Image (cartoon, grey):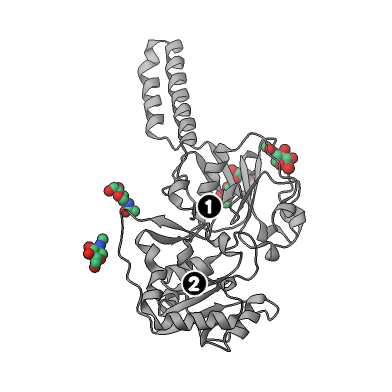
Amino acid sequence: MFVFTMESRGQSSFVRKIYYFFILQVTLSCVLFSFFRGSKNLVQETDRSIDSLLKPDDPLLLILLWTFSGQFPQNQCPHPFDTHGCTFTNNRSLYSLADAVIIHHDEVCNSRNNLPQIKRPAKQYWIWFDLESPTHSANLNFMDKLFNLTMSYRVDSDIFLPYGWLEKHNGSQNFSIPVKTKLVAWAVSHWNPNFRRVQYYEELKKHINIDRYGRNQMSLPREKHNEILSTYKFYLAFENSIHEDYITEKLWDNSLISGTVPVVMGPPRENYERFIPPDSFIHVDDFSTAQKLAAYLMELDKDDKRYQQYFNWRSRYRPVVNVYWMLQYCQACQALKEAPSYRAISSIAKWFK
Ligand SMILES: *[C@@H]1O[C@H](CO)[C@@H](O)[C@H](O)[C@H]1NC(C)=O
Ligand SMILES: *[C@@H]1O[C@H](CO)[C@@H](O)[C@H](O)[C@H]1NC(C)=O
Ligand SMILES: *[C@@H]1O[C@H](CO)[C@@H](O)[C@H](O)[C@H]1NC(C)=O
Ligand SMILES: *[C@@H]1O[C@H](CO)[C@@H](O)[C@H](O)[C@H]1NC(C)=O
């Protein structure tokens, strides 16, 4: 069965302990401080300690977003990442004060000169951030011997950023399958005849009708995206390259949020089953040929009962997509607090394949 729901990824009790320990320290030192300064100041100092208890989000760690101008949290992260104690900035003048610097691979990988050039403060952590697959991450070797934490879609990253996840419902819920009027859809923006997905599509479409969206094809406006795709029974969630855990919005948003059944091409079936139930998707590798897959899809099309079984899991879970960058930054805050005081990654390139 799959293991990653966000429920199990909430604030750890370890962080909470550190946090209470910190509060205790502040309170104790205020009390002691006032005591030694004499009774005249006691009230005033006690007030201040209460004040600090009422405002537990006093900044502790400064996190500099070296690149990536997306939305970022102003000292307050949404649940379940609402740990206190990080301030985020994109002001590079604060580099020497930063406890950590988050560096988005795609925006620095063209040249080492895009990385911070000033001498790194002794305790500063560099966090390597990438959401592309290794195939589409240039110059990974530029990143060797620089970083302290990784942040990516790979489950074994220090900071794991999935494109989506399942949330458990409270109890059981009824899901209504969207009205289906069409059969198979595929949206592709990057058409490369050398990609396996394109070759597979060319073969598949000989045996089943597929509506293609994207450049020079039918248009799929962003605001109508889910609405249009929801009218299809199946969506081809074909990844642009095959890597462990590399399962993107093609599955999470285009298929699951839209309420279609995903036909996936990507890492092996077992890898998908780490994230979603086995009976929620169809894997191209389940069939020896594209023709057999096409035959199966047409069979399901005629058999409502069997088709509906692909939605059984929805009474227990709902898919959630990661749309705001904010969330990842909040996870970074949490991870930093749990990180050891020293950690070095000798080679990103050797790990990220
Ligand atoms: C960046 O930080 C520096 C140093 O604190 C400050 O002088 C400057 O005004 C800041 N820039 C912006 C755009 O906030
Ligand atoms: C689940 O139920 C609990 C307790 O009734 C409630 O506090 C919580 O908000 C519910 N969560 C969701 C996602 O509905
Ligand atoms: C789900 O649907 C069944 C059958 O229509 C109904 O008996 C049940 O009350 C519904 N449950 C919820 C949570 O709506
Ligand atoms: C971070 O990593 C770099 C390179 O691997 C290393 O030189 C540095 O000492 C590390 N810093 C900390 C605080 O672990």
Dot 1 and dot 2 residues touching (CB under 8 Å): no
Residue 284 percent coordinates (x, y): 57, 73
At 55% from the left and 37% from the top, the residue drawn is 337
Is residue 56 shown above or below 226? above
Q: Of marks 1 and 2, which one's residue comes earlier in the chain?
A: 2
Q: Which residue is mark 1?
A: 328
Mark 2 belongs to which amino acid?
A: Pro
| Residue at 44% from the left image edge and 19% from the top image edge | 28
Q: Residues under labels 1 and 2: Cα distance?
A: 26 Å
**SS of the residue at dot 1?**
helix
**Circle 2 sits in a helix, a strand or a loop, which is it?**
strand
Which residue: 49% across, 65% down? 252
What residue is at 43 percent from the left and 68 percent from the top?
257
Asked if residue 187 shows in the view, the reply is: yes
- The correct choice, above or below, for 311 with respect to 231 in the image is above
Q: Which residue is mark 2?
A: 262
Residue 148 at x, y percent in the picture:
67, 43
Which is nearer the eye, 291 or 164? Answer: 291
Q: Residues within 10 Å of mark 1 (few under 14, many from 20)?
A: many
- Within 10 Å of disc 2 (Cα), the crowding (few <14, some 14-19, many 20+) is many
- Compared with 265, 60 (above or below) is above
Residue type, numbered disc 1? Gln
Q: How far across and down, in percent of the image, does residue 334 sit?
A: 52, 42
* Disc 2 residue: CB within 8 Å of ligand 2: no
Task: Give coordinates of residue 94: x percent, y percent.
Answer: 62, 44
User: Which quarter of the image is occupied by the C terminus?
Assistant: bottom right
Label at residue 353: none
Query: Residue 77, can we see it?
Result: no
Seen from the viewer's position, the closer of residues 230 and 128 is: 230
Q: In this picture, is 21 found above or below 206?
A: above
Image-quarter location of ligand 4: top right
